[in-house]
Image (cartoon, rainbow, N blue to C red):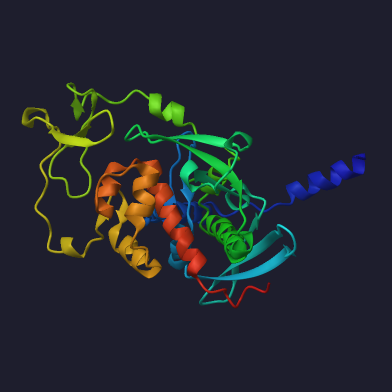
Amino acid sequence: MTDTDVTVRTDNIMALTLPDPVEFKAKMQAIATFQRIVRENLIPGQDFGTFPGIDKPTLFKPGAEKIAKLLELADAYQVEDKIENWTGNGMFHYKVKCQLIHIGSGKLISEGMGECNSMESKYRYRWLAADKLPPGTDTTKLVQKENTNKATGGHWTTFRMDNEDLFSQVNTILKMAKKRALVDAALSAGRLSQLFTQDVEDLVANGAIETDHAAAATKEPDKTQHWCVKHNTEFYKRGKMKAYAHPVKDDKGTLVEWCNEPADKKAEPKQEPASANKAAETVTVSGVDMDWLKESLKSLHWTTVISEYLKPKFNCLSEKVNGCLLEMTPEQISEFVHEVQNRLDMNEPPDEEVPV
């Protein structure tokens, strides 16, 4: 670098025009106001999710769509790069750009990039229980994973198999690239990187990062309120529960009874009478919008969600979805909601605006 270069760069810096203080303050206030609106209206577990050991929640596709709607933005997509190999085991990769355009003015507000490929662990492999493996499979030659349900103490082993049905997931891989690009663009448009990160759920699913479950499990609980001394666990109240309680289970994880918090230990303030508009409010269970979940399961025709997913994966005991949600941890609820959203994305028809 020469002295001339230094002089030119210094002159450029000195030539910058500082914004008007009043205008600058107004813009900063507008950003803060929008961030507050987002915090108040996005639904945990549906629009964003939290993972142990990760400082900020990660923004999901439904949350990104709501942000775009709040800002009156339309999304448009373009495939910037792709690999499509339909021979052998196949290889598919898509790099997608998402543009968020103001509906009223047609002005480009922000852009985001997203990539997805079939070599990611969640597409390349399947994890199967021993009874789901092909007959004669030598499990000693397979990578295995030990699974534990923190809520029930259940324990099971799964084995990694190559995905032999990769070609049926091509559209899903393309849509995942689109989703990542949309979230990237929405975070930029709303200046929301202070509130959310992105793709953590995909990184966890692919094994790229490990969430600090051990630290979360060993965190000292607050025993000053709603704590059961007899069973050394926390009382909680979720959904339509009228008082604080916790389940009591035997060594096999079977529900024996519910232990209710004694009346003289209750610390919750008295609730005000329900307003006339209460019935119009969104009904949630453990933070999940039940109207959305009901309509989503209906559109997927997923009538076996309890027997084929919730019970074997999370060892739920209830015969109803809302009951299962009350038994699940926040991490498990986020995983379930994300699975529902992924299935909805897979069922969507290809979008005409994406040139493949």
Q: In this rendered view, identify the residue nearer to me: 158 or 195.
A: 158
Q: Position of residue 60 (x, y in %)?
A: 47, 54
Q: Position of residue 318 (x, y in %)?
A: 24, 48
The answer to which quarter of the image holds residue 19 is: bottom right
What's the residue at 39%, 54% (across, down)?
Answer: 46
User: Would residue 263 appear left or right of 329 to someone viewing this image?
Assistant: left
Q: In this rendered view, identify the residue nearer to me: 147 or 281.
A: 147
Above or below, comparing residue 156 to residue 135 in the picture: above
The answer to which quarter of the image holds residue 244 is: top left
What's the residue at 54%, 57% (across, down)?
Answer: 183
What's the residue at 24%, 58% (across, down)?
Answer: 283
* Residue 174 shows up from this direction: no
Q: Quadrant of the C terminus?
A: bottom right
Above or below, comparing residue 103 to residue 67 in the picture: below
Q: Position of residue 214 (x, y in %)?
A: 45, 27
Q: Quadrant of the N terminus?
A: top right
Q: Position of residue 333 (x, y in %)?
A: 37, 47
User: Would residue 216 appear left or right of 324 to someone viewing this image?
Assistant: right
Furthest residue toward left: 263
* Residue 276 shows up from this direction: yes
User: Would residue 88 appear left or right of 211 to someone viewing this image?
Assistant: right
